[in-house]
Image (cartoon, rainbow, N blue to C red):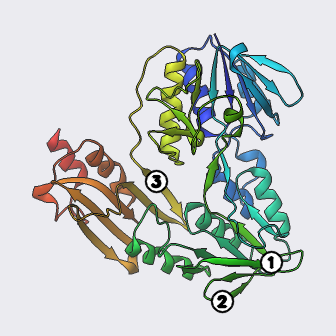
Amino acid sequence: MKVVIIGFSLAGYTASRYILMNAPKTEMEIFDVDKYPYYPHPSLYGVLSGESSVDAIPLHPAKWYEDRGIKLHLGVSVKSIRAADKEIVLANGEKVSYDKLLLANGARPFIPPVKGADKRGVFALRSIDDALTIREYAKGKKNAVVIGGGLLGLEASEALGKLGLKTTVLEFAPWLLPRQIDNEGSDILIGEFEKRGVEIKCGAQTEEIIGDAKVSGVKVKDGDTIPAQLVVCATGIRSNIELPKESGINVNKGVIVDNHLRTNVEDIYAAGDIAEHRGRVYGIIPAATDQAQIAAANIIGKETVYNGTIALNTLKVAGIDLASIGLVNPETKEYEQIRKMDADKCLYKKIVLKDGKVVGSILIGDRKSVKPMTEIITEGINVEEVKNELLEDDFNLKQFLEKRK
């Protein structure tokens, strides 16, 4: 059997490894427009700051794949999919046949429709080449603005700070990381970033990027203008649905898949930032990994069902460990929320409960609790009798779990 994978970010890489380990005789060809072998996207910030070399961040060199019989085609664009003939057509007109096809060509950065967004000095960060271009442009610049206070925006602001730029982050929402944490957690992070010289403005709507041909500043809706010779947009992603859409594959925000990660077209699957499952494009690392493994299992004949992914983000921002698990900002009253905060220690813990069970948690500065708390949530363990002790430093989460097993 021959499997073709379009896209070689996390989902494409994970699927290829799964197939390699579980069906090693499968013929695989992988195509990606990027000219570098798979690298973890969080590594881009090291490239941007100059702390990591380009050669150091790919997980394996191209020869690693070649030695395992995987044909890796980098810097190659796929023009169309001819499902009836079970082949893809490359930009140069070459045709490549397949038995099973996996769409893992991810997403692209969303550039907000702000006046002046087309000026020189406005960037998005999604690839190694993006990081290198921004780093080169930053030379000799004094001020930068990052539009977007999510994970990508905060990482970018820290990297730009290491390049010596005075950086301001503009977040439209009332607090940072609006998908991952709450207002109280945001306050902890803002304090830490301000210690590092990064200015944070929440509730700030970008009105215009000003300057002549080049960026000279960013105007926000309240009338304030922030000087900047460089702007990085970290305002989310949009799935790359153009190729599948033109090929007769059902799309909405992403490529629509069923519980086996199959599209409406026979023998074509999708996973990662391009896939839309039950109306949702996750856009997070755990979902890309889960979906890629399940799609790969189904591709090689191991029927497996995907029932969604619990939102789990673990990261280190400005040296601070942060985890966001499950439902962290409930909008209705049937949820109970318990918090513990110590700003001096950069510590914030929160659990969200419903019917005695933890359904979500925020952990800032408490790395050791992430794994047991995730297990408490995924296993649906009732914690009613200890709910007021769960967040105490001397409460042994691992011991509590062992007693419940």
Mark 1 to mark 3 CA distance (whole Å): 32 Å
Query: Which sits in the foreground, 3 or 317?
Result: 3
Give the structural element (helix, strand or loop) at label 1: loop
The extreme bottom residue here reads: 223
Task: Please give the name of the residue rendered at 82% of the width and 37% of the height, measured from the top-left corner.
Answer: 75
- Among the two numbered marks 2 and 1 on one chain, the one whose residue lies closer to the N terminus: 2
Mark 3 or 2, nearer chain start = 2
Secondary structure beneath label 3 = strand
Q: Is residue 69 above or below residue 320?
A: above
- Foreground label between 3 and 2: 2
Please state which of the two labelled residues, at mark 2 or mark 1, is closer to the viewer.
2
Residue at position x 22%, y 58% in the image: 353
Residue 313's tag is 3
Place of residue 308 in the rendered image (x, y in percent of width and height, measured from the top left): 41, 39
The 10 Å Cα crowd at callout 2, few under 14, some 14 to 19, many 20 or more, is few
Is the residue 4 above or below the residue 388 in the image?
A: above
Residue that mark 1 sits on: 229
What's the residue type where badge 1 is placed?
Gln
The kind of residue on which mark 2 rests is Asp
Residue that numbered label 2 is attached to: 224
Pinpoint residue 46: horizontal percent, then vertical percent: 69, 58
Task: Please provide percent x and percent y for residue 290.
Answer: 47, 35
In the image: residue 162, left or right of residue 79: left
| Quadrant (top left, top right, bottom left, bottom right) of the C terminus | top left
> Local crowd at mark 3 within 10 Å, few (<14), some, or many (≥20)?
some
The mark nearer the N terminus, 1 or 3, is 1
Q: Quick check: 359 left or right of 203?
A: left
